Amino acid sequence: MPPVETVRGPIDTADLGATLMREHVLVLSTEHVQNDGADWWNEDERVAEQTDVQIIVATGLYTYDEIPTSTSAQPARLRGDPPGDRGADHRAELERHAHQHRRAADAATGTDVLDGCPRPRWDEAEAAASGAVTRSSPGGDMSRADVEFPAEGTTLRGWFYLPDSGPGPFPTVVLQHGFSAVKEMHLDDYAEVFAAAGLACLVYDHPGFGASDDAPGTPRYEIDPWQQIRCISHAITYAQSRDDVDPRRIGLWGSSYGAANAYVAAAIDRRVRAVVGQVPLVTGSLSFTQLVRIDNWAATEEMFAADRLARMKGEPPAMVPVVDDEPMAPSALPTADSFEFFTTTAEKRAPSWRNEVTLRSLEFFRGYEPVDYIPRISPTPLLMVVAPGDRLVDGGLALRAYQTAVHPKKLVTVEGGHFDAYTGAGFGASSVAARDWFVEHLVDRVAG
């Protein structure tokens, strides 16, 4: 466990001194303690039963088995529907051009282009000291190819990354995204980090999203978690069918809703030898009650019922925006950071994303309980990457869910909210933690 310094009472973090400027700071309020009970953490008695603890400063990444949790929610805001052609050929062309543009911009500006906004590269010395993979030569130590494979009667499309680390077959990580998101929304960044460590990667879009085709009998932009979980197993089968993949060393990575899918798939598909889920949804029912105002519950139930009747009659499915910039407007993900992430990222690097999902996707969301499967993941090694400040899918719920998991398991926490894990310092922390987990369990460890 990393060394811990405890500070009691309200304090300005600047007073901690310059020596702590490079440390990770987790800010706690008395609400966290009160919500979780008095005996919330007593590791080596370094932090005892104190309701006035405000800040814990720890060196490196948080890996505690227990930390305080919170169930508070944040008000909603949202909108946006960037233009885009739905044709598969056009989408694929846009994806190729977007990727080439980002890499050309990297080379021309000496920066990493994330969300379309140049930012300085990681400091080389700091990255080397922390073990992080630098991105000064993106794509220079790997190759990427467009791929497609059959699943659930449709065709899923994505990318396959091969590391430039000698002959295969390679341990391979399957990556899939969250609620309505497409692979261009930073999955390439994670795959590049993993591939630089000697891991092949299969990245793909869920059925009905991005470059993938619709599943038979399912309208486009419908999020059916169990359909997505079955497609994960198809993706694993496709990976195992390749000569450049070691079929005994398959890892699974997911983010947000995709993290939930990864947990469930790892619990029921024993071909998965290591799993990582970041900023996860763990309980659809509780998250639904946090995201939908209580005075709208009855009306929402009526909308679900009316949509089912209409679809049974052959009418098109009811659709709702994923995000909206109006605080009170209906949307699937009613938080301000959701609106900012999806609209900005879609405009800059993911033109195939559409700001709509079927209403039934929300009904499926409400009934989805991946927390029930987390205790069943063992003996597959589990890494949970959680943002305690997540207010889209409450980080406190994820921290509690971690306690139900059985070893081998590890918890890493990242600062910020739900979407901070994808860029900047959050990306550095989340990607390196996942990379190290896969290297430990897929590369260094001989497959059984």
Image: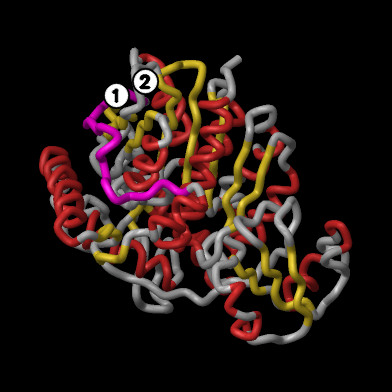
Q: Is residue 242 left or right of residue 47?
A: left
Q: Residue furthest front?
A: 125
Q: Mark 2 belongs to which amino acid?
A: Tyr
Asked if the residues shown at circle 2 and circle 1 are in contact, with their CB atoms under 8 angstroms apart, the answer is: yes
Q: Which residues are magenta?
A: 132-151
User: Is disc 1 placed on a helix, strand or loop?
Assistant: strand
How many residues crowd mark 2 within 10 Å: few (<14), some (14–19), many (20+)? some
Q: Quadrant of residue 419?
A: bottom left
409 up-or-down from 299: above or below:
above
For marks 2 and 1 on the same chain, the one whose residue lies earlier in the sequence: 1
Left or right: 437, with 209 as reference point = right
Crowd rating for badge 1 (residues with CA inside 10 Å; few <14, some 14–19, many 20+): some
The colour scheme applied to this rendered structure is: secondary structure
Which residue, given by chain and number where applicable, does mark 2 sit on? 238
Residue 6 in percent (x, y) is at 77, 72
Q: Position of residue 332 (x, y in %)?
A: 42, 61
Q: At 57% across and 60% down in the image, what residue appears?
A: 387
Q: Is residue 316 left or right of residue 132?
A: left
Q: Residue at x 61, y 63 (%)?
A: 388
User: Foreground residue, 404 or 168?
Assistant: 168
Residue type at the position of mark 1? Phe
Query: Is residue 257 inside the magenta stretch?
Result: no
The residue lying at 69 percent from left, 49 percent from top is 401
Q: What is the x, y in percent for residue 294?
A: 59, 71
Quick one: SS at disc 2? Answer: helix
Residue 365 visible in the displayed image: no
Residue at the spot x=74%, y=64% of the render?
A: 4
Q: Quadrant of the C terminus?
A: top right
Residue 126 seen anywhere in this rendered image of the structure: yes
Q: Which mark, residue 353?
A: none
Q: Which residue is under mark 1?
A: 149
